[in-house]
Amino acid sequence: MQNQAIYIVSQAIRYIEDNLHNNLDLDIVSGALHYSKYYLCRIFTKTAGLTIHNYIKRRQLTEAAKLLVFSKKTVIEIAIISGYKSQQAFTDIFKAMYKTSPAEFRKTGKFYPLQLEIQLKNPPSNMDLKKDDIVFATYADVEDWMELASQAADGYPGLDQAAYINKLHQYINLERALILRNGDITSGIMGFSAGTGNIDFLAVHPQYRHLGIEKLFIKKLLDGLLYNREITLTTFRAGDKADTGYREKYCQLGFEERELLVEYGYPVQRFVFNPEKGGI
């Protein structure tokens, strides 16, 4: 049953990717694939980790951002290509997601994706993962780690990949990089700083986001690596339309809001987990 859902959602993703420059919505995709829109909506969200509406919007805006940086098309041309009926409508949603106008984004000359194409795989029959399955990453894991990092681009806007790889090598040397595998799927990855108790990067494969993988990583830290210490991280601010559920997830785990910050030029908020207050 699960493999069938992955097959259907992969079909939907392929159709979306082949038609990114056309008008797209749930009705159009479900009609093209001859599935009930209610059924497709439900299994897409569970399998891909976000709604089909959000996936379409984020992928189209990512392609629009790429055109802004790497083409000479006008903003109105890019707006129409991206499925918007007016430049103003496109500018409003682009600014809400990228935190800058299309014109200003173009001026920076720096492209980063909101959402890359999700790559789904048939999972092993055993999905009962435990914190003890989480191990220190090695250099042999770098390629798979970076593949998952790209799948989690929705959670880390503006991430500099080259700088990130350099930092990953340091974390591997210091045994501050953790990885969770399930068969040939890299299910989750985490980079943390022992001195500050900060989680610098935590990503879960879209297919595993409903299984509480984040909770396993936090427990791994609390049960030995950062025993009985406060844990901090940064995530989206309240009301950020670019957030696909990260802020809510950390609140559910018992993290508490702290000060507002800016990272990589992006507005974020610091969260703290205090083990003495419970949670997890």
Image (cartoon, helix red, strand yellow):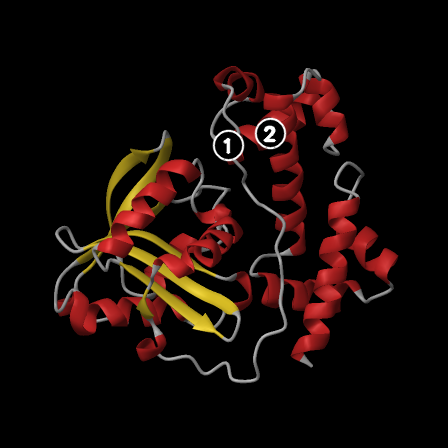
Q: Kindly identify the amino acid type of the residue bearing the numbered disc 2.
A: Ala
**Mark 1 crowd level (few <14, some 14–19, many ≥20, 10 Å Cα):** many
What is the quadrant of residue 202 in the picture? bottom left
Q: Kindly identify the amino acid type of the residue bearing the numbered disc 1.
A: Tyr
What is the quadrant of residue 134 in the picture? bottom left
Could you say where residue 31 lies in the image, as x and y percent from the top left? 86, 58
Could you say where residue 43 lies in the image, as x and y percent from the top left? 67, 68
Q: Is residue 241 left or right of residue 217?
A: right
Q: Is residue 186 left or right of residue 139?
A: right
Rendered residue at 37%/42% (across/down): 164
Where, quadrant-wise, is the C terminus in this rendering? bottom left
Residue at which label 1 appears:
98
Image height check: is 216 above or below 65? below
Rendered residue at 75%/58% (across/down): 12
Q: Is residue 119 left or right of residue 134?
A: right
**Mark 2 crowd level (few <14, some 14–19, many ≥20, 10 Å Cα):** many
The mark found on residue 65 in the picture is 2
